[in-house]
Image (cartoon, helix red, strand yellow):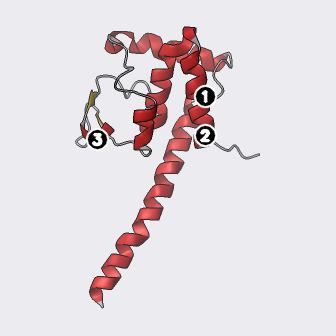
Amino acid sequence: MTHTPPNDQTIVDEYFKLRTNRRRSRLAWLFGMIATYGLTPDALEGFSWGPEASIYIQGKRRPVSPVHPQWAIIFRLKEEQPRNWQDCLQSLSEQLYCAMAYQKVGVNITDLLLSHQMRKRLYRSVKRPRKVLRHLASVS
């Protein structure tokens, strides 16, 4: 049996379902960060915003860019960021894991990360032939 990760529309729908629920609206921000940047809640600890919707992660040299830059805008991740998110990140991630365990959230973190990795590989393979073609064109 094969498991297919959620498609983009399912992720967006799940985000807005969380966002409209008053009890889970703060979880929507964390869900959106995971879906947009493909990082676990633990990896998001201590991040800072970079240029063009990218984020800086402690221990990484380069900023992490979203595969879908429009998600950072649509989800309003920078604007909706909780004020004391560094203090409550552990609590938010525990609440998100619990909500997923009790199926209050239809997409789990593993599926979000898998979907992000597949999207990243797909876009990378789409971009790669252009570079090869440019290189071949410059040879002739």
The residue where tag 2 is placed is: 9
Determine the image quadrant of residue 102.
top right
Q: Is residue 103 visible?
A: yes
Residue 33 circle label: none
Quadrant of the image containing the C terminus: bottom left
Q: Is residue 126 shown above or below 78?
A: below
Per the image, label 3 sits on a secondary structure element best described as: helix
Tell me which residue sits at (43%, 46%) in the image. 67
Mark 1 and mark 2 in contact (Cβ < 8 Å)? no
Foreground of the two, 78 or 5 = 78
Local secondary structure at mark 1: helix
Amino acid type indicated by mark 2: Gln
Q: Amino acid at mark 1?
A: Glu
Q: Is residue 70 above or below residue 126?
A: above
Q: Amino acid at mark 3?
A: Glu
Q: Residue furthest bottom?
A: 140
**Tag 3 residue:** 52
- Residue 131 image offset from top left, x and y in percent: 35, 71
Residues under labels 1 and 3: Cα distance? 25 Å
Chain-order first, disc 2 or disc 1? 2
Question: Which residue reaches farthest right?
Answer: 1
Q: Secondary structure at mark 2?
A: helix
Between the C-alphas of marks 2 and 3, the distance is: 23 Å
The first of marks 2 and 3 along the sequence is: 2
Please tell me which residue is depicted at 33% across the width and 84% down the height of the picture: 137
Q: Which mark is residue 14?
A: 1
Q: Is residue 77 left or right of residue 28?
A: left
Q: Residues within 10 Å of mark 1 (few under 14, many from 20)?
A: some
- Residue at screen point 63% across, 36% down: 10
- Image location of residue 55, percent across then percent down: 30, 34
Instruction: Bin the neighbour count of mark 3 within 10 Å (Cα to Cα): few under 14, some 14-19, many 20 and up.
Output: few
Tell me the residue at 29%/27% (across/down).
Answer: 47
